[in-house]
Image (spheres, helix red, strand yellow):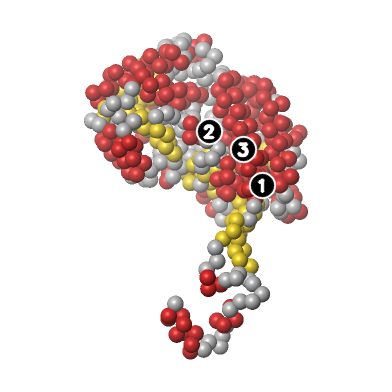
Amino acid sequence: MDTPQTALEALLERQRKAFHGDPCPDLATRRERLARLARLTRRHADEIEAAIRQDFGHRSDVETRLAELATLLQAIGHARRRLKRWMRPQRAAVDWRFMPARAEIRRQPLGVVGIIAPWNYPWSLAMLPALDALAAGNRVMIKPSELTPATAQLMQRLVARYFADDELCVVTGDAAVARAFAALAFDHLLFTGSTAVGREVARAAARNLTPVTLELGGKSPAIIDETYDLDDAARRIAFGKWLNAGQTCIAPDYVLVPESRLGAFCEALERAVTTLYPSPAGNGDYTAIISRRHRQRLIALRDEAHNHGCRVIEIGASAEQLEASGKLPPTLIINPHASLGVMREELFGPLLPVVGVTDFAAALDFVNRRSHDARAHPLALYAFSHDTAHQARLLTDTQSGGVVLNDTLWHIAQTSLPFGGVGASGHGAYHGEHGFLTFSHRRSVFRQSRRNAARLVHPPYRRWLLKLLRLI
């Protein structure tokens, strides 16, 4: 049922009141909350799998375990082991003119954190930021996507069983509820989703001066240089692209390969896909598209490219043959023009444009031309090259949220690395200590010593003070 505005505001007020009653939870309390989140996930893993499978029509249970549950449990363990160090005040240097005073930085909870989660990884992309916010000592409210209602209802029911609603709670409802949620006066708001909706969320939050972390998207390229092994690149790109049928914000969105190697790479991709996902219609490892509307959008993008003369390769089956399953086949679109939808829009599906370029330098220029258009820097950038000069140039001459060299996706699984975008792909980051800091206020503390020289600069000012200031 939709949660009305008054109920949302009352829930926020309840969480804020609880926070004021315990504004800086101790280490034991925070660790215990994280332990409860881990117990919830472990004990109800089968129910979570079933709910996600129901929402997608078909979702590989292995992908759910890998991308939703194992990732979350790993992150919880990482945070619990390191939380004591993260909470410790940090010593800061004091200029010699102020000695023997002391300074430090204290990491304080912000208050109540709001999280608007997407549909593509409905459990982990709600709970990963929630665990960071809980580790930092905050209260948390989550709004899951209305496109995954079974998962949202299960999440709401389980969270209510393991947490008081003034600690962690879940509110469900349609897009109108999401808009009302974004307009609440949170102390921090994290949104994961499309760039277009991210702009609306940022506008709503700005009315309350609520700081936001936006995890958006964009077209993440994969670049292959002149000498990299094509079969190896194809297998790694195929895994990153067709995990969750391409419905991943950091999936490779297009591939740039030297023109002379274009045909050979497409053949290598076909071999890799056939190995990973034989017979997609009945393949339990290959995920369906989240909704009929999303599927029709992807078919329209495919048809536009085909009608403009692009070679389209559907691997294993045609879209029409897979209609009853709600799936779309892994599909290559060869050399689409930059004006076509497949090269302008984030695909979020199993279509993969493959574009021939003259060389690695031309590939970097291609990415940078896109990036300079409205700061459209990709959320992830993948490059396949053993040439250290190529790697160095890519790292210095391009911008992206993250980079993976000689593979795809795996930067998101490193809890020690911040995850976030840059420019139109988002701002702010979380994961591990970076998430702890995102949901903390770094408070400056200066401790004046009993004996100090500060009174010497109090008025009335003497002439000698001006001479001294000029000297130093």
Residue 267's place in the image compared with 222, above or below, is above
Identified at 73% across, 40% down, the residue is 32
Identified at 32% across, 36% down, the residue is 388
| Image side of residue 251 versus residue 394, left or right | right
Q: Foreground: 74 or 169?
A: 74
Secondary-structure class at tag 2: helix
* Disc 1: which residue: 84
Secondary-structure class at tag 1: helix
Q: Is residue 197 visible?
A: no
* Disc 2: which residue: 413
* Disc 3: which residue: 78
**The disc labelled 2 sits on which kind of residue?**
Ala
Q: Foreground: 209 or 219?
A: 219
Quarter containing the N terminus: top right
Residue contact between numbered discs 2 and 3, judged by CB atoms under 8 Å:
no
Q: Foreground: 443 or 370?
A: 443
Q: Earlier in the sequence, mark 2 or mark 3?
A: 3
Q: Position of residue 340 (x, y in %)?
A: 33, 30
Tag on residue 284?
none
| Image side of residue 266 versus residue 422, left or right | left
| Image side of residue 414 versus residue 112, left or right | left
Identified at 41% across, 25% down, the residue is 237
Q: Quadrant of residue 344?
A: top left
**Label 3 vs label 1: CA separation?**
12 Å
Q: Position of residue 462 (x, y in %)?
A: 51, 89
Q: Position of residue 278 (x, y in %)?
A: 46, 11
- Determine crowd level at label 1: few under 14, some 14-19, many 20+ residues with C-alpha closer than 10 A: some
